[in-house]
Image (spheres, helix red, strand yellow):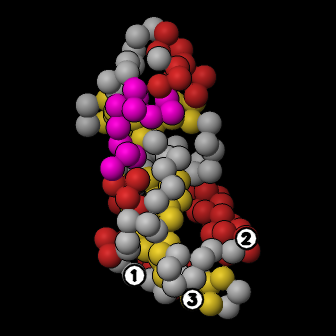
Amino acid sequence: MLVDFRTLPDTSRVWIYQASRTLAANELAEIENGLNDFLKEWTAHGSDLKAGFDIRYKRFIVIGLDQSLNSASGCSIDTSVHYIQSLEKKYDIDLLDKMNVSYKQGEFIAYKTLIDFKKMVKQKAVSAKTVVFNNLVATKGEYEEFWEVPAAESWHARFM
């Protein structure tokens, strides 16, 4: 059951997928249409899942699930991961690699491997004040409050 992401409660579970590159306007339109179709049909053991999505900075796909109606099952999560994998293949992008870091450089969103990010910390090319994207947030409330934060306030702080 597709709903507007903004209407999901703050307790809704979220999954964040960061793209390895900026998505083109035509790709974004196709992805939005595909997510609309996918989430309308997404179920757990035959029961509707109340879900919505958000796409930010032409780079991040966020799927939110209100678990007060029905919770995701292992099979339904697998189905969503398979859907994301199909997007990776179709658009030749990485969405599932958690060993990469996205951060802001002014208005630009940079994407680096974790190894390169660590090197940049040592070279003082990024600092504790650098705005990073904490894709480990688990709920919509955390997404809205703690997703886009200075590195010092995220798991990235361990490299500072």
For the residue pair 12 and 55, the one nearer the viewer reads as: 12
Q: In this view, does 133 lie above or below 130?
A: below
Under mark 3, the amino acid is: Asp
Under mark 1, the amino acid is: Val
Q: Can residue 28 be seen in this view?
A: no
The residue where tag 3 is placed is 48
Q: Does the magenta stretch include residue 149?
A: yes
Q: Which of marks 1 and 2 is nearer the N terminus?
A: 1
Q: Residues within 10 Å of mark 2 (few under 14, many from 20)?
A: few
For label 1, the SS is loop
The residue where tag 1 is placed is 3
Q: Is residue 79 above or below residue 2?
A: above
Q: Nearer the viewer, mark 1 or mark 2?
A: 2
**Distance Cα–Cα, label 1 vs label 2:** 22 Å
Instruction: Say left or right for 145 vs 88.
Output: left
The residue where tag 2 is placed is 74
Residue at screen point 47% across, 17% down: 160
For the residue pair 142 and 81, the one nearer the viewer reads as: 142
Q: Which numbered circle lies on residue 103?
A: none
Where does residue 86 sit, x and y in percent of width and height?
Answer: 64, 65
Looking at the rendering, the stretch of residues picked out in magenta corresponds to 145-156
Instruction: Say left or right for 120 vs 71.
Output: left
Q: Can residue 77 be seen in this view?
A: yes
Identity of the residue furthest to the left in this view: 107
Q: Earlier in the sequence, mark 1 or mark 3?
A: 1
**Distance Cα–Cα, label 1 vs label 3:** 12 Å
Q: How crowded is mark 3: few (under 14 residues within 10 Å), some or many (20 or more)?
A: some
